[in-house]
Image (cartoon, grey):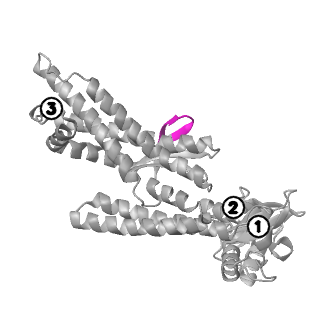
Amino acid sequence: MASFRIGSAFGIPVRVGLSFLLALPVVAWVIGTQVGQWVGIVNRSLDAEIAADALSTGSIPFVVGAIAAVGLFVGVVLHELGHSLVAMRYGYGIDSITLWFLGGIASLAEMPEDWKQELAVAIAGPVISVAVGLASYLAFLAVPSIVAPTAASGVLVDATRFVLAYLALMNVLLAGFNLLPGFPMDGGRVLRALLARTRPHARATQIAAEVGKAFAFLLGLLGLFAGNLVFVAIAFFIYVSASSEAQQVTTRAALEGVVVRDVMTPAAEVTTVAPSTSVADLLGRMLDERHTGYPVLDGGALVGLVTLSDTQAVRPVERDAYRVEEVMATDLYTIPADADAMSALTEMQSHGVGRLPVVDVRGEFAGIVSRTDLVTALDIIRSTGSSRSTPRATPGTPRRPEESLR
């Protein structure tokens, strides 16, 4: 999701996505066109006695709609701050809070697996939303309900009371909607936390994810029959997110106790090149060995990586003169040999690479771990039910050319 930072709160970066910038005027316009309907709802719900006619003329509906839309998204930020501050209280880092067209997302560096901590983090957002709704209602009561002597000030009073009443209702509705069991929404995380009281975290996640996907299916059907594309979009997001998080959690559980050293190809079995190798000789080796990338070692130390794409900047007539050290990449992504296997998979995904060089405690080259190594380990663990039989890469196993070194 493309986004940019607009500020920070409690040290947490607050970002807005491009989809949010498109959604904000749309939400403001929708509220403005429905001011008359909302005035009726507010009057019936809160006995507000707001004059609908005064807010439905000229540009007033759209000014009111814009203010209400901004207030609504401020409530979303406060909701996400509730999650974030409680997570920080338990020692979990928060990468950012991002607004997008479906609301907001607090990106936790790591999700708590202790059920009590997850329950507290999950419930904090809805609690804050209810508090914001209550504060808006108290402010609504504090605004004078008697029409001022002039018509202009009377409209201002009605507009102010309407916005506060609207935010009071919407924040309470936001809390209620988020507590529905649509994992990974707040209600789904509450469900997982309660399930994890008596079950392993991975199993609780699988159950909560299945409930979430069923909820997403029903919400999507409702959206289709009601012609509500927002419900359809939310349903799609819930379904994909539930599937993704369930897969990630079960993978982490399967790889628990497995370290990179257990699954990597050791340095002695990895084909490497020296910095002084000519580009011409390197291309010859690539053709003979059907490899498209090599670690570059200088006296046993890892100094770079060279791939076929690195050589393409050298003209054919100059390949004998150019050395690997002149074209290799030196900005390396590496992983310690004693790191857990899940960290290696996360690093590959975050950097968009197929394998990582492994270094030992002295920083020396220890081997290569690839996505294929991790997938093979997962397959064996799942078939045996134990990580003890996780194999090292088979000696002499050819590395797949499509597994990029960077």
Residue 49: mark: 3
Camera-side residue of 324 and 242: 242
Magenta extent: 4-13
How far apart are labels 3 and 1 at the CA level?
67 Å
Residue 364 seen anywhere in this rendered image of the structure: yes
| Mark 2, secondary structure of its residue | helix
The outermost residue toward the front is: 198
> Counting other residues with Cα less than 10 Å from the Cα at mark 1, is it few (<14), some (14-19), or many (20 or more)?
many
Give the prevailing secondary structure in the magenta stretch: strand
Contact, mark 1 vs mark 2 (Cβ under 8 Å)? yes
- Residue, x 62% and y 60% (percent of image)? 351
Q: Is residue 56 above or below residue 381?
A: above
Percent x, y of residue 253 = 65, 67
Percent x, y of residue 3 = 46, 48
Residue 352: mark: none
User: What's the residue type where badge 1 is placed?
Assistant: Val
Earlier along the polypeptide chain: callout 2 or callout 3? 3
Residue 260: mark: 1
- Name the residue carrying label 2: 343
